[in-house]
Image: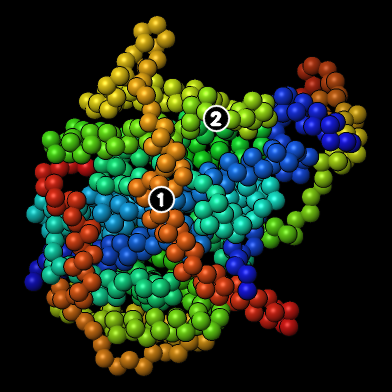
Amino acid sequence: MDDAKQLEAFEAKIASGAKIEPKDWMPEAYRKQLIRMMSQHAHSEIVGMLPEGNWITRAPNLRRKAILLAKVQDEAGHGLYLYSATETLGIDRSELLAQLHTGKAKYSSIFNYPTLTWADIGAIGWLVDGAAIMNQTALARGSYGPYCRAMVRICKEESFHNRQGYEIMMHLAQGTPEQKALAQDALNRWWWPSIMMLGPSDDQSPNSDQLMRWKVKMESNDAIRQRFIDRTVPQADFIGLTIPDKDMKLDEKTGSYTHGPINWDEFFEVIKGNGPCNANRLKARVDADKKGAWVREAATAYAAKRSKEKLVA
Amino acid sequence: MTDSQWPVWEVFVQANPGISHKHVGNVHAADAEMAIQNARDVYTRRSEGISIWVVPANNISASSPEDQGAFFEPSNDKPYRHPTFYKIPEGVKYL
Amino acid sequence: MTLQEAKFEYLLRLGDSSLIIGHRLSEWCGHGPILEEDIALINIALDFVGNATSLLTYAGQVESKGRDEDALAFMRGEREYRNLLITEQPNGDYANTIARQFLFDTYMFFLYEELKNSKDETIAAIAVKTHKEITYHLRHTSEWMLRLGDGTAESHERLQNGLNDLWMFTSEMFEMDEVDAFLIKEGIVPDLNKIKANWEKRVFEVLAEATLQIPTTTFKQKGSKEGKHSEHLGFLLAEMQYVHRAYPRAKW
């Protein structure tokens, strides 16, 4: 079959709702785009362990400590599922990690913000995971089988993250005045980065048409953002916290909230590497990788010795 | 020595006694024992399993998408392999 | 000494050791040598924190002064902590961590095996659950002892160094005082001499298989039973307890 016919069959398959599997024919642009998106997603999970990992040793009680450990562990697991799904596209994990470590690959802008207080752990679970779930439930309906399966698994686990974050915020908001101030402060700092992390506005987001047709992207950034805002604002009201956007108001006709202007300059600066923690986050990953090199090498050497012994025996 | 993330092992988990092991994903590991432990930590964190198999991914052979027609379509015209093909009068039991 | 006092003291020893070593392990989170190992280490840390929570909860009940597990974990100072010195030692490199975990896991494995037979039902029940967890931990760390000990020249050297550095903290695990004597008589806890024999046998076997030398360190450190710790514990507690202490009336 020539490429044009292959492409036609490929697109028809996607239009019919069938999934594309690793060995199926796919256009190079599709493969490349998926590798870019999926690895970015995997890197985000791994880098995302850092801002929260920060607070494991300082969690305010044993229950919160255990929950946070379990949550950060899930994130490592999610990174693993996503790297694994990406590997099905014919690129291996060491190469993907090299792309992260050299700065060639990106990860979510949100993890370049610092976690300054315990309340930030609540804000991350509630807002950041909440926004991520919006995006991921959409992606679970995409066209690439391994990515969808990873998304389904991740979404299932992620809903605990979202809830525990909201629960932290609720306890703080209903706690002492100092605690409530911590919660409001965390919301003030995380709100805008959270709605930015869903990506640039549709008018600034190139080549979306083809990606939508190929079901690599399922919904526009703005549509996902709007749904996130509409769900989150009442949650903030419920626990008596204020969204830091003086222009935000409910449009009675649509039932949606309109929001003030987003500072896209900040977003693009963070993406470029100029956020408050970009350098630290990347350094932590690079250091872990370097410090782990002799460990990985030792395990490989040991396995080789053992399999040789087996052959001799 | 080039840096390695270790070989890939495919993971199969049995969720309950009496049912088959099902493919759930994979892990990287330097050896089989490590692969089993990693699979346990990654895929059974929420009590999803009672038994684990791991197989080096490069030991798995798979049919290819082009084989689909030749492999699987010939069975489509053999409905007599399914019990629903046969009409049994009402009232006959245990068949 | 009353039975109540002896039990409370012993529960703190067990609970604090689990809490502190769990804390140390959790410091690896996000910094492990490979993703899979990050996940494994967090799993183990989580088991330790869970185990500490059960033990400190019970310690609070035994004490009957209204202190719950969080009051015990977050409101006691350095001199009141009863964890073994080995558990508070810093992570060092990965070999150092594995050596520490292996020495302590082996101890815990044999100790909790005996505690399953405790005449105190709560301790016995906690021990049954914990022994399953520790069996897995020990398997994990023993495998790593072999991989690093018999892996490359570098990993061998690092692990041998780690073992040598930690060896002076091992004999403290088997020290007994009047609390032990009291509880042994009651059939609540085992004689640590028995644990020591099992521990040595297993440790020496694994070291031999891992091509490692038994350290020759003769000087030994002790003091945790009187709350005399290494300098490391103060920093660890300062970090662990600060949020809890900074907001005294807060619920989380």
Quarter of the image that includes the C terminus of chain C = top left
Residue A284 in the image, given as x and y percentages of width and height: 41, 59
Q: Name the residue type under label 2.
A: Ser
**Residue C155 appears in view:** yes
Please determine whether, in this image, residue B68 is positioned above or below residue A8. Answer: below
Label 1 to label 2: alpha-carbon separation? 23 Å
Q: Name the residue type under label 1.
A: Asn
Give SS at disc 1. helix
**Residue C54 falls left or right of residue B95:** left
Q: Which mark is residue C103?
A: none
Give SS at disc 2. loop
For the residue pair B83 and B12, the one nearer the viewer reads as B12
Residue C24 in the image, given as x and y percentages of width and height: 32, 65
Query: Mark 1 — residue?
Result: A278
| Image point (51%, 81%), residue name | C154
| Image point (33%, 32%), residue name | A191
| Image point (53%, 43%), residue name | A41
For the residue pair B10 and C160, the one nearer the viewer reads as C160
**Residue A262 falls left or right of residue A95:** left
Residue B87 in the image, given as x and y percentages of width and height: 85, 20
User: Which color scheme did the rendering employ for the protein?
Assistant: rainbow
Tell me if label 1 and label 2 are in contact, CB under 8 Å: no
**Residue B36 falls left or right of residue A143:** left
Query: Mark 2 — residue?
Result: A205
